[in-house]
Every structure is written in C-alpha cells, then in structure tokens.
Image (spheres, rainbow, N blue to C red):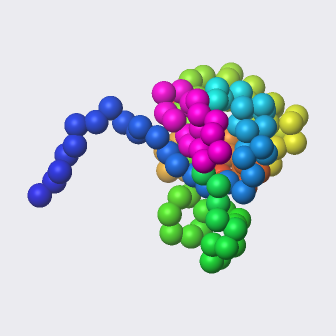
Amino acid sequence: MSIQPKTKGLSHVALRTTDFARTKAFYNGLLGFPVAVDTAEVLGFMVGSVFIGFKQAAPTHPGGNVFTPFNVGLDHIAIACDTEAELHRVAEALQAAGVENTGIKTDTVMPKQYVAFKDPDRIQWEFYMA
C-alpha cells in the first residue's frame, strides 16, 4: 500500500551547527539568505520558499561534531539555480570568498551542471541547475 501524501514539497530542513555566529555569518552574511528566526535555540534562513533551521550540536555527541556525507543520513542539500549564468556567477563568488567548492561540474546521473560547496561545519550543499 502506498501512502501518497498530497504535498507542495519540503516545508523545512533542520540541521545542527557548532557555532550560531559563524553559521549566521556564512548563510546570511556571505550567501545572503534572509534570517527568518534568530533565537537562542534556533537560527533559521529562507532559501527560496524552504526554511532551513539550525540547532546547536551537542558537544558530547558520539562520533564527533564534523559532518560527513558518507554516514547514514544526509548526503547533501541542493538549491535550484535557474540559469547557467547564475550558476557560474555563484561558483565564481564562492571561489572569490574562499569557500571550499568543486567549481562547475556535470552530474553523471542527471546531466545537469552544479557547484558543490561546504559550510563551516562541512555540511555539503550544491547550487544545481533546475
């Protein structure tokens, strides 16, 4: 039996961070995502119509506090990019800002261009051609 929920897509994504100030500087200051929530418990941004929220990572979590896409769970998050010109502009801006990234690549599964990058907690993101 299939549940088949009626949905408009993602409501939000919840992530953990080691440092709210550094996260705010990266997502709002560098990437320019508007701050939607800024409390002692949650820091959240609007990425298009999707809310991306951060909570403080527990310092005693077994396995450490460094993200790796090879564990079970989140591999990466992809943000839709409307035009090739915008993708190239964003890739150049990431490089100029010293953000670790792949440069423009082509996905081998779905032949679309993207640039992957890492946030300060090494969570992997992509700007991906829509």
Q: Residue drawn at (77%, 43%), measured in percent from left and top?
A: 21
Q: Quick check: 80 above or below 19?
A: above
In-front residue for pair 62/58: 58
Q: Report the label total.
A: 0
In-front residue for pair 86/66: 66
Residue 84 drawn at (x, y percent): 64, 25
* Image quarter of residue 115: top right
Q: Residue furthest left?
A: 1
In-front residue for pair 27/60: 60
Q: Residue drawn at (71%, 27%), measured in percent from left and top?
A: 32
Residue 88 drawn at (x, y percent): 72, 29
Secondary structure mainly formed by the magenta segment = strand
On the question of residue 37 being in view, the answer is yes
The stretch of residues the image draws in magenta is 36-53
On the question of residue 114 being in view, the answer is no
Q: Residue drawn at (59%, 68%), measured in percent from left and top?
A: 70
Q: Quick check: 77 above or below 129?
A: below
Please identify the quadrant where the N terminus is shown: bottom left
Q: Which residue lies furthest to the front in this view?
A: 40
Q: Going by the image, does 54 lie left or right of 102?
A: left
Q: Residue drawn at (63%, 77%), measured in percent from left and top?
A: 62
Q: Does the magenta stretch include residue 34?
A: no
In-front residue for pair 121/68: 121
* Image quarter of residue 22: top right
Residue 55 drawn at (x, y percent): 60, 51
